[in-house]
Image (spheres, coloured by chain):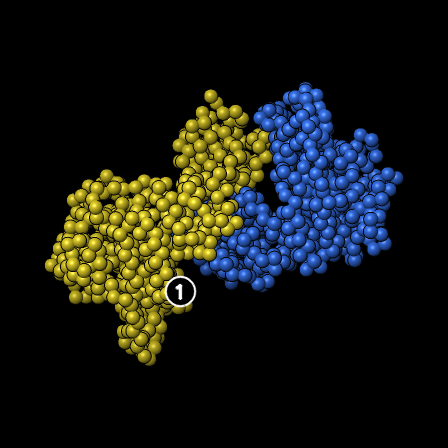
Chain colours: A yellow, B blue
Amino acid sequence: MNRPGIHLKLRRIGIDTYKENVAYLHRDCPVYRTEGFQALAKVEINSVDDHQQVLAVLNVVNDGQIMAVDELGLSEQAFDQLGLDDGDMVCIAHAVPPESLDAVHRKIAGERLQSEDFLSIIRDVVDHRYSRMEMSAFLVACSESGMEREELLYLTEAMVNTGEKLDWGEGLVADKHCIGGIPGNRTTMLVVPIVAAHGMLIPKTSSRAITSPSGTADTMEALASVALGLDELREIVRHERGCLAWGGTARLAPADDILISVERPLSLDSPGQMVSSILSKKVAAGATHLLIDIPVGPTAKVHRMNDALRLRKLFEYVGDRLGLHLEVVITNGEQPIGRGIGPALEARDVIKVLENDPEAPHDLREKSLRLAGRILEFDPDVRGGEGYAIARDILETGRAMARMQSIIASQGVNEKPPVLGELIMEVAAPEAGFVTEIDNLQMARIARMAGAPMDKGSGVDLLKKMGDKVEAGEILYRIHAEFPADFDFAVELSKKDIGFSIDDKPPAPRNFPPL
Amino acid sequence: MNRPGIHLKLRRIGIDTYKENVAYLHRDCPVYRTEGFQALAKVEINSVDDHQQVLAVLNVVNDGQIMAVDELGLSEQAFDQLGLDDGDMVCIAHAVPPESLDAVHRKIAGERLQSEDFLSIIRDVVDHRYSRMEMSAFLVACSESGMEREELLYLTEAMVNTGEKLDWGEGLVADKHCIGGIPGNRTTMLVVPIVAAHGMLIPKTSSRAITSPSGTADTMEALASVALGLDELREIVRHERGCLAWGGTARLAPADDILISVERPLSLDSPGQMVSSILSKKVAAGATHLLIDIPVGPTAKVHRMNDALRLRKLFEYVGDRLGLHLEVVITNGEQPIGRGIGPALEARDVIKVLENDPEAPHDLREKSLRLAGRILEFDPDVRGGEGYAIARDILETGRAMARMQSIIASQGVNEKPPVLGELIMEVAAPEAGFVTEIDNLQMARIARMAGAPMDKGSGVDLLKKMGDKVEAGEILYRIHAEFPADFDFAVELSKKDIGFSIDDKPPAPRNFPPL
């Protein structure tokens, strides 16, 4: 049976509106008379046979060049979601507000929500029934002051249960995650080959950079393919006991990506949001044992040890109830880890560590060995405290390098490895003294301006780190860029603020709990 | 001095995105390399000389038909705000997040905000620096559970102080406002001529319908022009002591319209939001004495007397501190007021009351006289309790009608008054008995479906009201429509639910405090 009402011709409009579906209707379309639409109204578009539907926000077109009066346009993502062809007939109607908005209103009014409330909200989010405004309302209502940790558990479970879930068929599936914010810091690319060489399963999927100059997936891509299908991934992991892939291909905890698309522009980053985002992805990816790294420092995501401890407890509470074996380490996040910032520069550091090159950045090597050691101790046969020595042994005997080469070969070698950007600016110390501070945020900004992560050879190469003694005019770091415009912007930015502080006295050493 | 960076050619894109500014950039535009934009990013567009700026959300265009790679498109409203011409050169950059978002984050964290916090937030809202997501975050953080009434006062003051303010140069400027939700209910069109005929100043501006089948401005437009410039308005008011105009032309408390564009789709309608919205508009419009009408009923906006009383206290608290002489009346909102629902039908009711026609709807006449009476008692020379009799005298002697005719003539007679829609469906009682309920919401929906308020002759004409005795098959109401498609939809809707309840026994009379 056909839908009643006015039928319109579907048209794909070549506009990318990311996670927000937009429908376009010509101002003179006869459907206004019957429905009383207004720009920004939420509408549903249905196939005439009623089998396909997509929700969208309405924009009103006054230009016959863009579309005709008898057409209904959809932005690219919305068109793809609907799954019909250009010219197919469709109907448009006011969208019924998602029923779960009732639970959001109860949350706004201060109620505690139940497990089924979160499930219905997250299901509607995943089905694209929420506008960005509505998600914003939900997230703010759930922010710090408004959510019990029990509710956080429900939210995380709902995020897991509304997507696919991987099953690796083993009792110990290791994973690691850093909450981010520290440039360089490519420990994952060392931890995975070490842990896999030990024989422990570590099928690691990572994200690409969004606000940082490089994510693990971006850096790994300088060496190998990372966009692998799920079947390929299984085959590689079966063979290598580990992988270093991009996680964007599987539909794991899809609510997470959608909510992040609202949290990020709003700078909503409450501990609860971080915990539910990370743990939902990990559980969906099939992890059973998880190590979380929380770097602390004045320009890290977490500034004070007290906040790190509170965040740790929240991870532990939710992780335990999800049945994860979860451990949290709090690490020094006072400055970037390693020397390179940007995909190619970071890959260079990683390879140097794997090659046991004496020039390899010591901090990257040490942190990676300690993290790998903690993960190796998930193995019941590894005695507490012995993990570090085993990890070091695997690295020093070249077994980590061999495993990395094998993983790279399995994923597919990058035949055109990036070269460092040839436009170079050397930034010098304005005065003599000791490096007392390196601003993570400013170094990340400069590297991004230079073109990272899009131009893989661009970024920042640090020649000095905290505590180093420098003469006036001695080089602190090099900016690499591929394109003149980017180069100029990055140089400009570093002139405004070089990101380094130099002082007469060396910085006081700070105490972090040993890994 | 010219702005650095890539210059693009401005282009007006014929897309209406209502209160959300959208910028369009071609996928291959060279600016992506330097800025790393992503769809939905918040951007600022600046004139090359840096004198004009507009903020917008970015959509990425993949279709050369819509725009070229060296162009920057703006949606219609954004284009108008920027105030440049097609082809002028502009620059695009990441928008700096509004500084006042810091206060929003403090509110989310549970802090009480100060007067200056609200002022900076509302100023940024008015300058279009907030995305809809950000406004949603602010509004939810300020919702019922999160806002002290002191903060509500600050918010309202901020809304007044970020727009224009009218000054009528007199010590007593009367106004009235109904919180809405009751179809028909065109008391304003009777109160204004009565009060003006008494000599009291009542420069009434009203809104058009947004979710209802008719607003006062829509109904008045059936009789006269309502879109008047401020100078015209002043001239008319000086002459007539009153007017019945559309309020959309003046920039009074502009934050209100912007916030409403987020509150409405989110169904956020906390008492606080209602109070700040109404009072900010009234103070900005120069009112000194204000009567607020809160209808209560099972299908009204406020369902219970207790909630009405709480809302009244909130109005009183904020109104008093704003220096308003404010009174609140709680009225019977159990069913529509008058017989007609829709612009032409409501105008007919109003004229019948003014003509003292014995067929005129009694409830509309009585309620209007009582409201007018209360307003007349703002006059120090009118003894408490005498207002009603004075109002009735003005009505019965024809002075109200004369004043209305004079106001209509001043504003400009509608030379083409609407005729009632000629497609008519008579909806009959399914059984004999008493009308015990009339659903305000369902009657409004049917009238809208029939074409109101756009088609001024469309709507619903009630022949029976609560308490009336009916035979089976006796007509309850008539649906009028102008267009067959609308007519079919409205008939369909009334068949699903006629909106009337019929019972053996008459409805129990409910007690409302006397006006």
Viewer-proximal residue among B227 and B121: B121
* Residue at 18% over, 47% down: A241
Q: Secondary structure at mark 1?
A: helix
Q: Is residue A98 above or below residue A369?
A: above
Residue type at numbered disc 1: Glu
* Residue at 32% over, 55% down: A316
Residue B502 visible at all: yes
Q: Is residue B432 above or below residue B185?
A: above
Residue A414 visible at all: no
Image check: A300 left or right of B295? left
Total marks shown come to 1
Q: Which chain does tag 1 point to?
A: A
Q: Position of residue B276 (x, y in %)?
A: 63, 53
Q: Quadrant of residue B161?
A: bottom right
* Residue at 25% over, 55% down: A188
* Residue at 30% over, 47% down: A283
Q: Is residue A93 above or below residue B271?
A: above
The residue positioned farthest toward the right in the image shown: B397
Mark 1, residue position: A492
Viewer-proximal residue among A313 and A450: A313
Q: Position of residue B1 (x, y in %)?
A: 51, 63
Q: Is residue A304 above or below residue B495?
A: below
Image check: A270 left or right of A201? right
The residue positioned farthest toward the top in the image shown: B473
Dot 1, how many residues are within 10 Å of its Cα: few (below 14), some (14-19), or many (20+)?
Answer: some
